[in-house]
Image (spheres, rainbow, N blue to C red):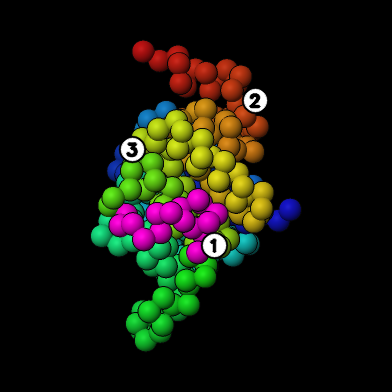
């Protein structure tokens, strides 16, 4: 397997506060990597440094061997990197289908070429495939605002995969989702990895969701990597148990 993403000794400080402290890891093609850690461990700051929304204090980020440290999120998007956020990034007044088409357009051409192109940007067929894959067909013509929260989360994730990204970074996709919809989300993410070879990284607080979904897990605490390995290894690591359970 080839490495899609490499993070080398990444650091981010805010004045005297070190939020990310020398983090290094790689993501192999076709891998599902989970990143977990207690609140304040640096997970979201790490994501934002990788995605160019924060400028790292030090360190490097490489995509397919190419240095992309500090590259703007919109430029990374055109290189095939997509993401979700903790807060939903859907368009409530548009239909589910139109949300998917707009997500696909983000990877295509310039603003001028999109304005001058076909109304559906040639993405209707791809949107139908994604509707089917994420089992949203019956909701295709519903406004996103009328979906349940779990259905909106499923749409948000489907939008991240709409253009067949080289790498997707998912920020707490399980947050606030009921158990039934959570099982469906996990199953669809496993399926897109198995059937399409999708590579993605998941930040998540729901430990059971991560343990069931990911091939490998990296654990942060106070901005540092304290453990990594398969779910069984991580679950029994004393440093992980201490980070989650050992503090008053």
User: Tag 2's secondary structure?
Assistant: helix
Q: Is residue 111 above or below residue 236?
A: below
User: Tag 3's secondary structure?
Assistant: strand
Rounded to the nearest whole Å, what is the CA distance between mark 2 and mark 3? Answer: 32 Å
Task: Determine which quarter of the picture holds residue 216.
Answer: top right
Side of 168 relative to 112 (left or right): right
Q: Residue at x 40, y 15 (%)?
A: 247
Q: Which residue is mark 2?
A: 232
Q: Residue furthest bottom?
A: 116
| Highlighted range, magenta | 128-144
Task: Determine which quarter of the picture holds residue 218.
Answer: top right
Ranked by sequence position, the earlier of labels 1 and 2 is 1
Q: Please name which of the two marks, 1 or 2, marks the residue nearer to the observer.
A: 1
Q: Position of residue 109 (x, y in %)?
A: 45, 79
Closer to the camera, 173 or 231? 173
Question: Tag 1: Cα neighbours inside 10 Å, few (<14), some, or many (≥20)?
Answer: some
Q: Which residue is mark 1?
A: 129
Q: Which residue is mark 3?
A: 17
Side of 140 relative to 235 (left or right): left
Q: Is residue 80 above or below residue 237?
A: below
Q: Which image quarter is the C terminus in?
A: top left
Q: Residue at x 33, y 43 (%)?
A: 148
Question: Tag 2: Cα neighbours inside 10 Å, few (<14), some, or many (≥20)?
Answer: few
Q: Is residue 100 above or below residue 154?
A: below
Q: Position of residue 135 (x, y in %)?
A: 50, 51
């Amino acid at each position: 397997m080839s490495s899609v993403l490499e993070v080398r000794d990444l650091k981010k400080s805010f004045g005297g506060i070190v939020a990310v402290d020398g983090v290094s890891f790689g993501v192999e093609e076709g891998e599902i990597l989970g990143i977990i850690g207690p609140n304040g461990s640096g997970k979201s700051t790490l994501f934002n440094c990788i995605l160019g929304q924060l400028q790292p204090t030090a360190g490097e980020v490489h995509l397919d061997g190419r240095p992309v440290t500090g590259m703007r999120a919109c430029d990374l998007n055109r290189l095939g990197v997509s993401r979700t956020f903790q807060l939903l990034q859907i368009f409530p007044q548009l239909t589910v289908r139109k949300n998917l088409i707009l997500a696909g357009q983000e990877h295509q051409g310039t603003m001028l070429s999109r304005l001058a192109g076909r109304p559906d940007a040639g993405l209707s067929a791809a949107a139908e495939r994604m509707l089917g894959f994420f089992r949203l067909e019956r909701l295709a013509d519903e406004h996103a605002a009328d979906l349940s929260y779990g259905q909106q989360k499923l749409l948000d994730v489907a939008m991240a995969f709409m253009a067949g990204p080289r790498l997707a970074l998912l920020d707490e996709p399980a947050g606030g989702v009921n158990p039934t919809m959570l099982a469906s989300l996990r199953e669809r993410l496993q399926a897109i990895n198995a059937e399409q070879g999708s590579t993605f990284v998941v930040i998540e607080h729901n430990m059971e969701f991560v343990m069931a979904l990911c091939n490998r897990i990296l654990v942060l605490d106070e901005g540092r990597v304290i453990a990594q390995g398969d779910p069984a290894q991580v679950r029994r690591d004393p440093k992980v148990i201490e980070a989650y359970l050992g503090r008053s």
